[in-house]
Image: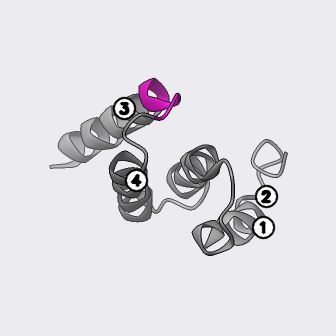
């Protein structure tokens, strides 16, 4: 909801460090956090790190297609800046 309301800083604060709480849907939460970093806070570096974390810790995630799509978007935006 905060993401949709463009309250990116608040969303990031809520989602950050959920891995310390054994959050049951951590892959989904961190995918959303990666989108917050990318779309709202202009921190593609942090979005990339989160996606790497998700890919490593959740290789069989049901969100794999969305994770891979966001990864491709990040890589394509990096390539267009170079």
Residue 64 visible to the viewer: yes
Q: Who's the residue at 35% across and 39% down the image?
A: 71
User: Which is in the foreground here, disc 4 or disc 1?
Assistant: 4
Cβ atoms at labels 1 and 2 below 8 Å apart = yes
- Identify the residue position indicated by label 1 in the image: 10
- Identify the residue position indicated by label 2 in the image: 7
Q: Which mark is residue 63?
A: none
Q: Who's the residue at 52% across and 52% down the image?
A: 34
Gap between marks 1 and 3 measured at Cα: 25 Å
Cβ atoms at labels 3 and 4 below 8 Å apart = no
- Identify the residue position indicated by label 3 in the image: 68
Under circle 1, the secondary element is: helix
In primary-sequence order, the first of circles 1 and 3 is 1
64 falls in the magenta region: yes
User: Alpha-carbon neighbours of circle 3 within 10 Å: few (<14), some, or many (≥20)?
Assistant: few
User: Which is in the foreground here, disc 1 or disc 3?
Assistant: 3
* Image: magenta residue range: 61-66
In this rendering, the answer to whether 22 lies above or below 81 is below
- Identify the residue position indicated by label 4 in the image: 57
């Amino acid at each position: 909801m905060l993401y949709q309301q463009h309250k990116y800083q608040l969303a990031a604060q809520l989602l950050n460090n959920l891995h310390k709480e054994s959050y049951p849907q951590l892959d989904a939460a961190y995918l959303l956090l990666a989108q917050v970093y990318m779309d709202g806070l202009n921190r593609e570096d942090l979005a990339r790190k989160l996606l790497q974390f998700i890919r490593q810790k959740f290789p069989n995630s049901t969100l794999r297609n969305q994770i891979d799509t966001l990864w491709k978007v990040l890589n394509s935006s990096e390539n267009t800046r170079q």
